[in-house]
Amino acid sequence: MRIFIGIDLPENIKENLKEIIEKVKKIKEAKLVKIENLHITLKFLGEVEEEKIEVINRTLQHCADKSKSFNVKIKGIGVFPSEKKVRVLWAGIEDGEDLKNLNRKIEDALKNLGFEKEKEFVAHITIARFKSIPNLNFIKELITKYQDILFGEILVKNFQLYESKLTPLGPIYKVIKKYEFI
């Protein structure tokens, strides 16, 4: 099964991001993330045998047990990898170090199970992906217009393990388990 670890977004944040999604719909190269699928990815694990899920569950529960709630702000938008070669449009996340620390905790714990550590964690919410380079002027205008817009604040008090089923209509996410902080 194809799995990842993420933080679900409250409905008000999803609603606040709708305005950008509506504007990005106009870009023919854009493959939009469905509103209900918007989330913050902490770690993508990829294809994993079902037998490994239980040990992953115990490991993630241990990470949650050592975590405390914290706030993050959803602010601004940007692109990966660069403004000249746009492949992903994202909403930004302002965070002290709490989100990075949570990611690091999860990365370190899962490394012991044989999962490779990612080079650098960049907290974001993917809004759209592009198969080819879109109109760069339009993207630049969007970034300029929304770079300082605050979409809301989230109290992060848990994270989830998700299954991601790929379908012709896009991925379908299903929560396997939710891990509450102490």
Image: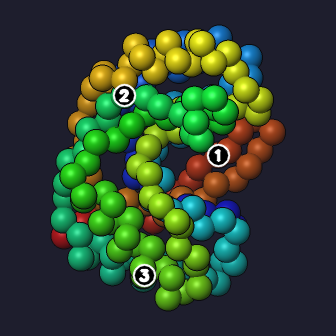
Q: Nearer the viewer, mark 1 or mark 3?
A: 3
Residue 38, position as x, y percentages in the image:
49, 38
Give me the disc on residue 76.
2
Mark closer to the chain start, 2 or 1: 2
Q: Which residue is mark 3?
A: 109
Q: Which residue is mark 1?
A: 172
Mark closer to the chain start, 1 or 3: 3
Do the residues under discs 2 and 1 have CB atoms within 8 angstroms?
no
Q: Is residue 99 above or below residue 53?
A: above
The amino acid at mark 2 is: Gly
Q: Tell me what residue is drawn at x 64 percent, y 84 percent.
A: 51
Q: Is residue 22 above or below residue 33?
A: above
The amino acid at mark 3 is: Ala
Local SS, label 1: strand
The CA distance from mark 3 to mark 2 is: 31 Å
Observer able to see residue 12: no
Q: Tell me what residue is drawn at x 19 percent, y 58 percent.
A: 69
Q: Tell me what residue is drawn at x 25 percent, y 76 percent.
A: 65
Residue 26, position as x, y percentages in the image:
65, 11
Residue neighbourhood size for the residue with mark 1, other residues' Cα within 10 Å, grouped as few (<14), some (14–19), many (≥20): some
The amino acid at mark 1 is: Ile
